[in-house]
Amino acid sequence: MRPYARTLLRQTPRAGSDGSWRSTIALDKRSAKSFIRINDRIRAREIRVIDENGEQMGILPPFEALKIARERGLDLVEVSPNAVPPVCRIQDYGRFLYEKEKSERAARKKQKVITIKEVKFSVTVDEHDYQTKKNQAVRFLNEGDKVKASLRFRGRQMAHRELGYNIINRLIQDIGEAGIVEFMPRMEGTILHAIIAPSKKDAPKPKPAAPAQPQAAAPVPQPQ
């Protein structure tokens, strides 16, 4: 049996009993995927221990720290393996995994996934179709996506590739400040394409403070 597939047992008090103990399975396969050492997997000779309340317990041998953790019905989790000595925390391992995955999910939600939207042209594109596709490209860029402008040459059109370059270069100029060219127009087989990325929008500049109004001079009292 592989070491990481071994079932780890954690002792917890049985509900309603007079201090008797029962063994419950505490191994989660997710720990093998994330390489988190817990309990008797910790191999360091000495570890720095933090209890469940965040208090420092000093440097202890792993077997002694594990004994304390089991007496409290908790696990010994290696939270900083690269420290010297490694840092371990006494805590509920199941809750530790739950909080870890919860924070990772929240971080993934905040990430902006940039996709590439393709806008296809032809050498014989008319003005109305060109404007429609240009507006699509601008909308994609404003939404934070990249745009791949592509144009396919067919048959004898390959002899007039400058017409395709004119269309793609016109698109780049018409897009203006909405995007920046990431890859200039280039040929791949019979397809001419360019990649345009959304431009970085500058943060709004703070409004200048209004000039202070001069205070009116106090009236000079007139002699009686």
Image (spheres, grey):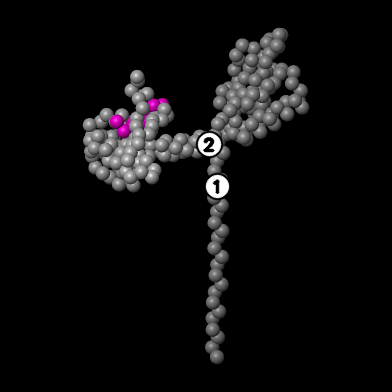
Q: Quadrant of the C terminus?
A: bottom right
Residue 109, label in figure: 2
Q: Quadrant of the N terminus?
A: top left
| 151 relative to 212, above or below | above
Amino acid type of the residue tagged 1 in the rendering = Lys
**Circle number at residue 205:** 1
Residue 124 in the image, given as x and y percentages of width and height? 74, 18
Q: Which comes sooner in the sequence, label 1 or label 2? A: 2
How many C-alpha atoms fall within 10 Å of the one at disc 1: few (<14), some, or many (≥20)?
A: few
Q: Give the SS element for disc 2.
A: helix
Magenta stretch: includes residue 33: yes
Please report contact status of discs 1 and 2: CB closer than 8 Å, yes or no.
Answer: no
Q: Is residue 121 above or below residue 85?
A: above
Q: Which residue does the image show at 70% across and 27% down from the upper left?
A: 133
The answer to whether residue 210 is magenta is: no
Return the residue nearer the eye: 98 or 128: 98
Q: Residues within 10 Å of mark 2 (few under 14, many from 20)?
A: few
- The image position of residue 200, as x and y in percent, is 55, 36
Q: Magenta region: which residues?
A: 32-40
Q: Inspect the image, locate mark 2, and give the three-letter code of the amino acid beneath it.
A: Lys
The percent position of residue 144, horizontal first and vertical second, equals 59, 33
**Residue at figure coordinates x 44%, y 39% from the top left:** 99
Distance of mark 1 from mark 2, alpha carbons?
Answer: 28 Å
Q: Outermost residue toward the bottom?
A: 224
Q: In the rendered image, is residue 75 in sight?
A: no
Horizontal side, residue 209 vs residue 166: left or right? left
* Label 1 SS: loop
- For marks 1 and 2, give the one nearer the viewer: 2
Q: Quadrant of residue 204?
A: top right
Residue 67 shows in the view: yes
